[in-house]
Image (cartoon, rainbow, N blue to C red):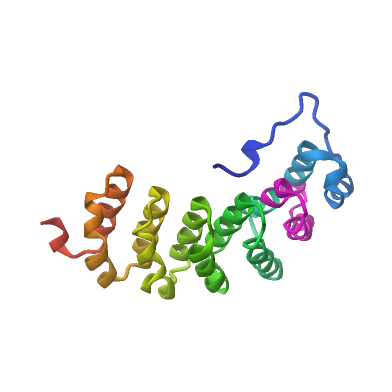
Amino acid sequence: PSFGFAECQIPTQPWEPKEPLSCIEVLENPSNHGREKTYRALKTLMMEWEEKAFPLIVRLISHKEPDFQRMALKTFKKIQTINQDYKEALETKAIEALAATNSEVRATAAQTLAELGTLIAEQALINLAQNDNSPSVIAWAATALGEIKSKAASNSVLLNLLKSPEPQVRYSAVRALGEINNPVFIKHHLPPLLNDPYIPIKMAVCETLGNSGDRRFYQ
């Protein structure tokens, strides 16, 4: 599934916030205003009053409604600068969201942590990749482990995911191992996937082997 602002349909005659306070009022009680108005308030606050958006984004991640949680998790990408204190708060909230009931929230949280690229979430992401029942969530957890270059994950978790019956999981595991770039794992565990029936996986394996720099992979 795709996540983010593209999913939100803007009304024909949209509400137009004129000042930060009007946006803040909406974001403090999003359930009273609906998805479209909340989306517009959040987007406007980010574009025009970015510094006021940070605490509200962090707070919205804990909202009871999955749509608002996902919206907040995806929002930080559009912020040009991010205060270190709020980055840490965002990391904490995103890690908490990995335990959300809604699988799309868990997947979006893993994606957010991948983009933040921090090792603080390593163990939580490993647990998610090992234990979640949603292929999409597992795939995003694998992607995040690759982005943070988790050596702990490459030892067992990602190697196990290469055997997954789900193509998106195998694909993400290949990409993650490529990001971590452990020559031993690449040499011994990726070549068998050149026979994978899923073409994108074959292509990812070829690219990873090629990027490894070992000329034997070209033979």
Q: Quadrant of the C terminus?
A: bottom left
Dominant SS of magenta comes to helix
Give how far across and how far down residue 2 sits, in percent: 56, 42
At a point 22% along the width and 50% down the height, the residue shown is 195
| Residue 40 higher or lower than 88, as above or below | above
Identify the image quadrant of residue 162: bottom left
Q: Is residue 44 left or right of residue 105?
A: right
Left-right relation of 180 to 209:
right
Instruction: Report the label total.
Output: 0
Q: Residue furthest top?
A: 12
Using the image, determine if residue 61 lies above or below residue 42. Answer: below
Magenta-colored stretch includes residue 53: yes
State the residue at coordinates (41%, 68%). 157
Which residue is at the front of the view, 194 or 49?
A: 194
Q: Position of residue 102 (x, y in %)?
A: 65, 52
Q: Quadrant of the N terminus?
A: top right
> Residue 50 placed where, x, y %?
74, 53
Compared across the picture, whether 156 is left or right of 191 comes to right
Q: Foreground residue, 88 or 107?
A: 107
Quarter location, residue 132 = bottom right
Residue depicted at 83% across the width and 34% down the height:
16
Q: Residue at x 85, y 50 (%)?
A: 24
What span is colored magenta in the figure? 45-70
Magenta stretch contains residue 5: no
